[in-house]
Image (cartoon, rainbow, N blue to C red):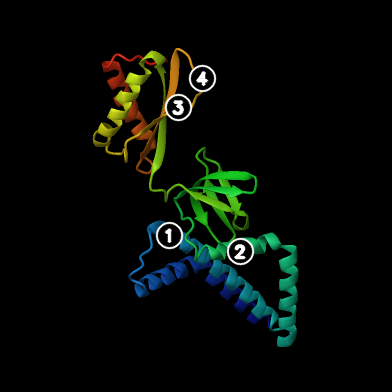
Amino acid sequence: MALAVGVYLLTGLVIALVAPWLARWLLRLGQLLNRYHRLTAERVRTLEGLIASLISLVAIVLAVVASFSLFVEPATLIWLVGLFSAAFGLAARGTVADLMAGAGFIFHNTFAIDEKIEFYLGGNRVEGTIETVNVRNTLVRAPTGELFTVPNGEIGVVRNFTRANLSATKLKLNVPSEELGRALDLLEALSREAVNLLPDLRDPWQVISTSDAMGAFTEITIVASTSFAQAATLKLRMIDLIFARLRTAGINLRE
């Protein structure tokens, strides 16, 4: 019996070790059978991690159950497994929730490796880039370098920046109140022209006011939409273009 136990446990360990290869093989087979639904490279890497960790977990559990089956009757084993499952479910509800949520990510394409996301975990917020996803937790690399380990069961609302089709940028200008009308006319005309001058600008920008204060200068805000992840670049181009046109028109901004 000791030899059989060793074989079962060794088999489970070997399957767990080759789980990444098995996951890749299963994904390739699935894509061959379904040629009309191609997965992105990020989604493939995400599924590989999820499926590999799930295979490892199942292999180890089955190896342990098979080892116990050598010492107890099948009916008793079923009773013990049921009792243990109930006790484990009560004592480790968080772990069970994590595993169930992780398994659910296999079917729900909510996020993928290398995508920039924001998780809302109760009152906390985690923002960064997905590095690893498995059935237990998700690893997120923050913009400042820290690595967050997020239990899958705690992931609530997911904000996926990578799958947005646009980004927004805005500028604030302090224009002399006596030149406000002329500045507004210039900026509105320039917004239509800028669509052709700035390739990343999707639509003419909007000029709005965010302040109710009146004085020698009036604060106005320019809001523009751009292609995803191009907001920072577009802002610099807009600053250069707007400043040059206002200077040519003799309108001086307050620093």
Q: CA distance from mark 3 to mark 2?
A: 49 Å
Image disc number at residue 213: 4
Quarter of the image for residue 216 reads top left
Quarter of the image for residue 179 reads top left
Q: Amino acid at mark 3?
A: Ser
Q: Residue at x 32, y 29 (%)?
A: 188
- The residue where tag 2 is placed is 99
Instruction: Answer left or right for 154 relative to 237.
Output: right
Find residue 233 and report its horizontal and vertical position in percent: 35, 34
- The residue where tag 1 is placed is 43
Q: Nearer the viewer, mark 4 or mark 2?
A: 4
Image vertical order of residue 187 relative to residue 44, above or below: above
Mark 1 closeness class: few <14, some 14–19, many ≥20 residues within 10 Å:
some
Between discs 1 and 2, the one toward the N terminus: 1
Image disc number at residue 209: 3
Mark 4 closeness class: few <14, some 14–19, many ≥20 residues within 10 Å:
few
Q: CA distance from mark 3 to mark 4?
A: 10 Å
Q: Nearer the viewer, residue 44 or 201?
A: 201
Instruction: Answer left or right for 141 relative to 176.
Output: right
